[in-house]
Amino acid sequence: MRHPTTPFVRMAALVVILSAAACGAPNSGTGATKSLQQPASPPPLPKNPVTLNVVDVAGDLQESQGMIEDFARANPKLVSHINFSTATAPELPAKIKAEQDAGRLDIDLVLTGNDALAGGIQQNLWVKLFPNYQSVLPDLNAQYMPGAKKFWDISQGNAIVDDYGDFGPLLEYLPGKAGNVPTTAAGLLSWAQSHPGKFMYGRPANSGPGRAFVQSLPYMLGDSNPQDPVHGWTKTWAYLKELSKYVSYYPSHTSEVMKDLGNGTVDLAATTTGWDINPRSLGTVPQNAQVATLQKTQWIIDGSFVAIPRGVSADKLAVELALMKWILKPNEQARAYDDGYMYPGPAVKGVPLSAAPAHSQQVIAKYGRPGYAQIIARYPQVTPLGNQALVTMFDMWDREIGGGKVK
């Protein structure tokens, strides 16, 4: 799953510390404001190679790091070095905003889900790619898979989708551990009541499976407006509050949910297709783990975005636009199958599993589930909450449901 480093690439852990002073950094004046202005047209490629600082807040390096490294190897006149770092989605928008206000942007490219993307759109943090630079980018309306096209629409022209899938929610369990696995939302609540501390899902702001589980509940419960968490989730918020009584804590990373499922701390967990395949391939969860769906489930489609913070130099912007075009090439998209993390993976049309690296084919053949196609076809696909609604949902969940039990 981990891509090897190369001479010009190093992996660095990013510890993001946002002090009150940093968050409140004043705008440094005309210099900082001017630096946030986009070129009116795509800038020319630079004469000298640039260093790119890439931050991942979605676990997307599993799919995209190899694509980015391929680009660097093929274009040494454009890229001299790449620094890859990781952070958490909730803290990234404030980090970028503080850097932009101070006129000292250290982040050149962001790999994100719709969580940090939504926060960035709300604060106008991203370079507007479409229609501004569509002349140097692929025709995504024609090139994307239908679900990826729906997901891309969420970006409002501020990003591209580099991988797609992660259908959810599912429930995952170990045979013989969970007893009678629930088949309805009401049944899940009853199960949690009789098995306190044994059901788990991740904090929605940090966890794709947690986010999918929470967003699918309004459909399962028959709420008035599943796309409006403020006025349309009466049944959902009541359900989540009751369910929370029987949840010991909410991990801030899905990987921790999978570890707790694998080691027996919990017996039932919210997951997705990718988070079912990948942890079993890594041995975090036993291979014989099973999955189930709840009646009236709606698949909350998911994926990863690539976005550019406003304030990058024209030279870096030009290289990053070329990189985005590269990432969407079918042979690079085949890397998105990876170890099943974002199942199925590719965002563009015409990329069969047979085009994937041999290791990816082996992992999906061994750890994928033959019934996935039927399961996915059984329930409708719906888009996640819109950007503002998603940010609002995260805040409401933190305040009213589980913020005090996040670990």
Image (cartoon, rainbow, N blue to C red):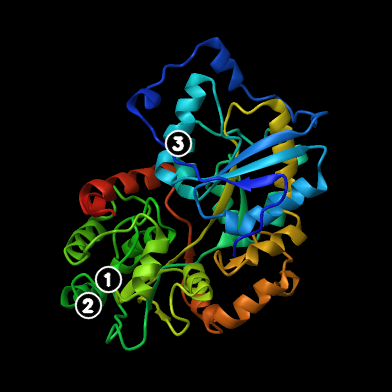
Q: Can residue 56 be seen in this view?
A: yes
Q: Give coordinates of residue 170: x percent, y percent.
A: 41, 72
Q: Mark 3 points at which residue?
A: 93
- CA distance separating discs 2 and 1: 9 Å
Q: Name the residue under label 1.
A: 199
Looking at the image, residue 90 sits to the left or right of residue 29; the answer is: left
* Comes first in the chain, label 3 or label 1: 3
Residues at badges 2 and 1 in contact (C-beta under 8 Å)? yes
Q: In the image as oriented, which residue stretches furthest toward the top?
A: 30
Select label 2 or label 1 by which is in front: 1
Tell me the number on the disc at residue 353. none
> Mark 1: which amino acid?
Phe
Q: Name the residue under label 2.
A: 191
Taking the spot 25% from the left edge, 60% from the top edge, the residue there is 249
Q: Give coordinates of residue 198: x percent, y percent.
A: 25, 73
Looking at the image, residue 238 sits to the left or right of residue 157; the answer is: left
How crowded is the residue under tag 1: few (<14 C-alpha within 10 Å), some, or many (20+)? many
* Comes first in the chain, label 2 or label 1: 2
Q: Dot 2: what SS?
A: helix
